[in-house]
Image (tube, grey):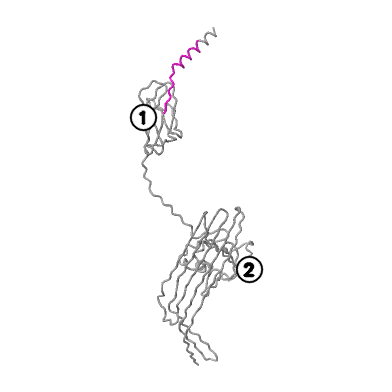
Amino acid sequence: MMTRLIFLLSMLLAQLFCMAQTITIKGLVIDSSDQKPLSDVTVRVVEKASAIMASGTTDQRGAFSIMLMDKPPVKLKLSHASYEEVEITLPLYTGSNWNIGTIQLVPRIQSLAAIVVDGRKAPSSFKIDRQVYQASQFGNAANGTGAHVLRNLPSVSVNAQGDIAFRGSGSFLLLLNGKPTQADPALVLGQLPAGAIERVEVITSPGAAYDADGKSGVINIVTKTGVEDGWMVQATIMGGAPPLNDFDNKRYNKPQRYGIDLVTSYNKKKWNWNLGLNYLRNDIAGFREGDVYTISNGIKTSFPSSGERSFWRYNYGGRFSVSFKPDPRNSFTGGFYTGKNFRAGWLISCTTIQGKT
């Protein structure tokens, strides 16, 4: 009896399975503008109540194949983020394989406004052991020398003779790209063009690593270098206007003011090559008026004087360096710097000696 019952149930299930209809829907989706296949298009099969019966996506060839059971579909909905949605009403079909052919999707018309990203480095920043100043913020020193850049820094002063004092002392350590310089700082900075300087780092409390015993601090000059692989070329040209007043100078009344700075850099993998050339002519036409007196035994002697005081100034130089960085922790750098700084002055004065009791 049990065996007969199991047999009848098996026959009933087999008959119901055979009555169920399997439907396969196939198709191809392409771009309406260039007729190229579209991948990752979502295809949804919808019945009468708008319920989703099945779904799928197109492959790299733009083709899709969706299998359904029992109920025939009513609609197909195709959607993609970059294209207009398409809805297709399907006719009544009783077969098992349904190829609906090629479907074209129309790209969305998107209005994209121009986006401009404007980023600038902070003109100055303060770290634990140093203050960092971007040289580009000092527009008044753009066509001068490194000494003109330092004039704008707090705690640094440069007198008329070009001598540099840091925190009131001339005893400080000058670094060029982190390397100590043996020459006089005024000489080095007077020959280094301002256009070649990227930033200046001021270290007021140097550690033992800088070997700065007895010094008031450290100034590190960082020059410009290329960032990415390839060539970087930068040229700066300066021209000065004639003086507003030549003070009736007879010997030197036509000062010349012009200059040029050329920097080129080449980066290739672990190597960096830098070459720089500069020339600066910056004359001064001036006038001196003064009075010096002495008092001896109740007698005052005065030496008033006035006259021309002009300067003929120029400097030129060249610099070359090569760096090799085999890994992030090691770097080897070599190079040289040469230049000349010339300054000549004319002092023509008329002195009158006057004495009073």
Q: Residue at x 55, y 65 (%)?
A: 319
Q: Position of residue 294 (x, y in %)?
A: 53, 87
The amino acid beneath tag 2 is Gly
Magenta portion: prevailing SS class? helix
Badge number at residue 325: none
- The local crowd at label 2, few if under 14, some if 14 to 19, many if 20 or more residues have their Cα within 10 Å, is few
Question: Label 1 belongs to which residue?
Answer: 88
Does 213 lie within the magenta span? no
Give the residue at x 48% y 68%.
144
> Which quadrant holds residue 31?
top left
* On screen, residue 231 above or below 259: above
- Report, in whole angstroms, how far the alpha carbon at label 1 lies from the one at label 2: 87 Å
The three-letter amino acid code for the residue at tag 1 is Ile
> Is 92 in front, or is 150?
92
Residue 308 place in picture, x, y as percent: 46, 82
Q: Which residue is mark 2?
A: 214
Residue at the extreme top: 1
Q: Where are the magenta residues, as a range?
A: 8-26
Q: How many marks on residues?
A: 2
- Is 266 situated above or below 159? above
- SS at mark 1 in the image: strand
Against 254, is 318 above or below? above
From the viewer's perspective, tell me whether residue 320 is left or right of residue 252.
right
Residue plotted at (40% across, 35% down) = 30
